[in-house]
Amino acid sequence: MLENEYIEFTIPRQKHIALIAHDNKKDDMVKWVQENHAILSSHFLCGTGTTARLIAEQTHLPVTAYNSGPLGGDQQIGARIVEGRVDFVVFFWDPLESQPHDPDVKALLRIAAVYDVPLATNRATADFMLTSTFMDEEYQRKVLNYNAIVTSRAGEFGKEISGKN
């Protein structure tokens, strides 16, 4: 029997929000941040390369910048999710344009799903998330306890090999 199936993490009232946009979506991201300046100004912002720079320059909001996506920025954001230092991701990606770093993008999306981090990949979802009542309060996210799952599966596998049930 698996104990502690989930591990709970608290997303605080003041969120750490990652802002990412592919080249054809950078202007849309900057406009979205400008339109939501009042809300976003009360949170910690970070982003990848040019997106972070453009947002900071055009909105005067402080944005911690990581590398550009193709140079590892998506992976840096993913690492911050694993470390518990990113609570929320807004990623305006271009589904019609092939990206040289598609594997990195897929890895970022996967890690956000694994760690139950809210992720918007378009403006409508970002608007819904930003206007959610959860933006103004703490939120308990539940992450599957993968260590317990692996241990449980290893124990079941060991029983199968030894013939004990």
Image (cartoon, rainbow, N blue to C red):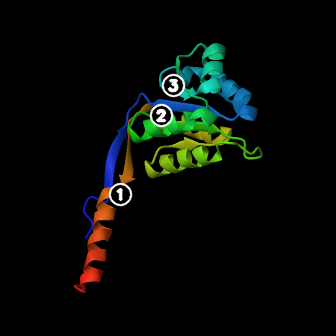
Q: CA distance from mark 1 to mark 2?
A: 27 Å
Q: Choose between 74 and 42: the one closer to the eye.
A: 74
* Residue 14 picture quarter: top left
| Mark 2, secondary structure of its residue | helix
Depth check, mark 1 against mark 2: the one in front is 1
Task: Decide: is 147 above or below 115.
Answer: below
| Mark 3, secondary structure of its residue | strand
Amino acid under disc 3: Leu
Q: CA distance from mark 1 to mark 3?
A: 29 Å
Which residue has dot 1 on it? Answer: 146
Q: Choose between 75 and 22: the one closer to the eye.
A: 75
Task: Decide: is 1 above or below 147.
Answer: below
Which residue has dot 2 on it? Answer: 135
Depth check, mark 3 against mark 2: the one in front is 3
Position of the N terminus by quadrant: bottom left
Sequence-wise, the earlier of marks 1 and 3 is 3
The answer to whether the residue labelled 1 contacts the one labelled 3, judged by CB atoms less than 8 Å apart, is no
- The residue drawn where x is 28% and y is 81% is 161
The answer to whether the residue labelled 1 contacts the one labelled 2, judged by CB atoms less than 8 Å apart, is no
Task: Decide: is 1 above or below 5.
Answer: below
Q: Position of residue 118 (x, y in %)?
A: 50, 43
* Residue 100 picture quarter: top right
Q: Position of residue 59 (x, y in %)?
A: 63, 16
- Residue 132 is at least partly visible in this image: no
Q: Position of residue 129 (x, y in %)?
A: 55, 39
Q: CA distance from mark 3 to mark 2?
A: 14 Å
Amino acid under disc 2: Met
Q: Is residue 3 left or right of residue 29?
A: left
Which residue has dot 3 on it? Answer: 45
